[in-house]
Amino acid sequence: MTRLFDDPDRFSEDQLRGFAAAYPEHVTVVPGGVVRARPQSAGRVAVVVGGGSGHYPAFSGLVGEGLAAGAVVGNIFTSPSARQAESVARAADAGAGVLFSFGNYAGDRMNFGMAQARLRDAGIDTRTVMVTDDVASAPAERRHERRGIAGDFTVFKVAGAAAEEGLDLDGVEAAANHANDRTYSFGIAFDGCTMPGADAPLFTVPEGKMAIGLGIHGEPGVRDADMADAPAIARTLVERLLAERPEGAGPRVAAILNGLGATKYEELFLLWGHVADALAGAGLTVVRPEVGELVTSLDMAACSLTLMWLDEDLERWWCSSADAPGFSRLPLPKVPDGPCVLPDAIPGAPITQGDAASREAAAGTLAALRALRTALHEAAAELGRVDAVAGDGDHGRGMTKGVDAAVRAAEEADSDEAGARSLLSAAADAWADEAGGTSGVLWGVALRALAQELGDTGRADGLRTAAGARAALDAVTSLGGAKPGDKTLVDALAPLVDTFTTGVARGANPRAAFAEAAAVATEAAAATAALTPRLGRARPLAERSVGTPDAGALSLALCARTVAALLGNGDADSDDNG
C-alpha cells in the first residue's frame, strides 16, 4: 500500500517536487514535468518521454545524458495532458526537433498527438514513436495494438543514445522504431497495487494463483494460472518471448528482468539465475543485462522479462554511457553554473468580451459547470470503482480534476466579461490540461467544439447549441476513433446528440429536447454493460468488463442529466429557442 502522501489528489505533483529536490544536478522542473538540468548542446534532437506517475524510474528518472532530454509527468497511471507535453518539449528542444516516445495507450496517443500538432504549428519538427512490446495484450498480427510496458526502457535508451551520437531527427526516429520492432516483453503479477489514499488494491490475485500478462497501470492479468516456483516462472517468461523471435534475428539480446514495485531485488536476482540459464540453453548471448526496477507500477508485486534482439547499431546504443537519476553508467555531473533559462510560458486562449446576449449564455454555461462539479464529486468513488473492473480506476478522480479546473478557468473568464465561446473554450482547455488521460482530452475537444458554435455574440439558441453538440460529437470521434458499440463515452454521447438535434430540428423546445436526450443517453450508458470494449485500456481485458457499464459513458450521462435538471424542461408549447 502507498502510505506516504499528503493530499492524494496531489500525489504526482508533490512527489515530482521532492524528486527534483533530490536530483538538482540532473533535472529541473518545468510546467508538466522535468528536463535536464544541463541542457543538450544546440543542434541535438530532444528525446522526450512520458506518461503517468507511479512508474519510477520511468519516466522522470530517465532524464539525463544518453537518455531522455525531458519527461512529461501525468497523474498516477494517467496520461499527461497535451499542454504538459507541449511545455516539456518546448523546454527540452535544442533546435533539432523533438522525438516523443511513450507506451501505446489511448490517452497518451491523443494527448501527445495534440501536443505534436501544436509544436509543428509553432515550427518545431516533432515525431512520435509508441512502444508496443507487451506480447500479452494483442496477437502478433496486431502488433500495433499492443501496449507498452518495460520495453519502454529499451526504446528510450536507444533513442537517447542515437540523439547523443548526433543523429538528426530522421535518424533518431528510425533508431527508436527499430528498437521497438525488436523489443518484446511478458509479465506475471502476484498481487495488485494500491493508489494513494485508497484502502484496497486495484485488483487482487486469488490465493495460490498468479496473473499472466500484466499491465503497468494497475490492470489485472489477462488470465490466472496456478502459482509456480522460480524455475517454472523463468521458463514461462522465456518461452513466451522466444516464440516471437524476429525473423533474421541473431543470437545476441539485451535483457531486462523488471520488478514492478513490491518484488524484492533478491527475488529478482534469484529468478534471473534461472532466466539466464534458459536463455543460454536457447543459444542466446545476453549483453549487459539489467535486473531491477526500471518501469514500475506503484507497489505491484510482479515481474516482467524484456528482450531486445540486437544488431550492431542496437548493441552500440544499448551499451553506450548514460547518466540519469534512475539509470547511471557515469560519475555524477557537476552542478550547472547559473540558473537554467526556460522558455516563456505558453500563452492562454484569448478572451473576447461578449455582447449582452452572449454574456447571458456565458452565465448559464458557468452555472452548468458548477452543477457538474457537484455531481461529479458526489459520483467520483463509484465512477472509480466501475473503471477499476477492467481499467486503472482513475476515471472518477480524472473527471473531478477536470471539472474543477474548468470551473476555475470559467470563473476567471467570466470576471473578464467573456462571451460564451471564450468562457467555454477556456474551461475546455483547462479540463483537458488538468485531467489528462483519455476522458480529459475528449471532454476538452468536445467542449471546445461546442464553444466555437456558440460564439461571443448573439444568443446561444437551440439551433446554435444543436450545431455545437454535433460538432462536439464529430470532434470526439475524429480524435479518439471510437464509434457506437466500442464501449466508450461515444455510446452515450451519440444518442444524446442525435436525440437533441432531431428534437430541435422538428421545432421542439430545446430544454425539453435536451431532457429527452439526457434520458436516452442514460439508457444507452447502462446498456454498455452488455458490450465488449474494442478500444482503450479495457480492450485487453474485454471479457472482464462484460456486465459492467463503461465509466466514461456513465459520467457523460450523469453530466447530461445534471444539465437537463438545471435547465428544466421548459414549456412544450413555447416557441423559445433559447
Image (cartoon, rainbow, N blue to C red):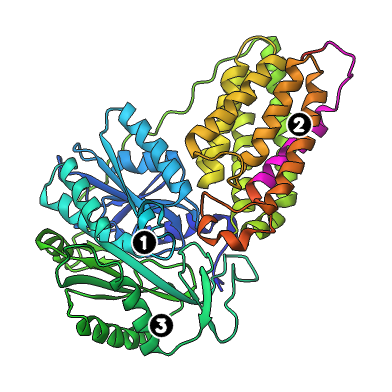
- Whether residue 508 sits left or right of residue 42 in the image: it is right
Binning the other alpha carbons within 10 Å of mark 1 as few (below 14), some (14 to 19) or many (20 upward) gives: many
Whether the magenta-drawn stretch holds residue 65 is answered as no
Q: Check disc 1 and report its element: helix, strand or loop.
A: loop
What is the CA distance from the residue labelled 1 to the residue labelled 3? 18 Å
What is the CA distance from the residue labelled 2 to the residue labelled 1? 44 Å
Amino acid residing under circle 1: Ala
Query: Nearer the viewer's eye, disc 2 or disc 1?
Result: 2
**Where does residue 482 sit, x and y in percent of width and height?**
54, 40
- Say whether residue 417 is visible: no
Q: Where, by quadrant of the figure, is residue 89 drawn?
A: top left
Circles 1, 3 touching at the beta carbon (< 8 Å): no
Looking at the rendering, in which quadrant would you find the C terminus?
A: top right
Residue 421 or residue 390, whichever sits in front: 390
Q: Where, by quadrant of the figure, is residue 137 drawn?
A: bottom left
Q: Is the stretch drawn in magenta largely helix, strand or loop?
A: helix
Query: Nearer the viewer's eye, disc 2 or disc 3?
Result: 2
Binning the other alpha carbons within 10 Å of mark 2 as few (below 14), some (14 to 19) or many (20 upward) gives: many
First in residue order: circle 2 vs circle 1: 1
Amino acid residing under circle 3: Lys
Magenta residues (range): 553-575
Q: Which residue is mark 2?
A: 517
Amino acid residing under circle 2: Ala
Circles 2, 1 touching at the beta carbon (< 8 Å): no
Binning the other alpha carbons within 10 Å of mark 3 as few (below 14), some (14 to 19) or many (20 upward) gives: some
Whether the magenta-drawn stretch holds residue 572 is answered as yes
Q: Which mark is residue 264?
A: 3
Q: Which mark is residue 58?
A: 1
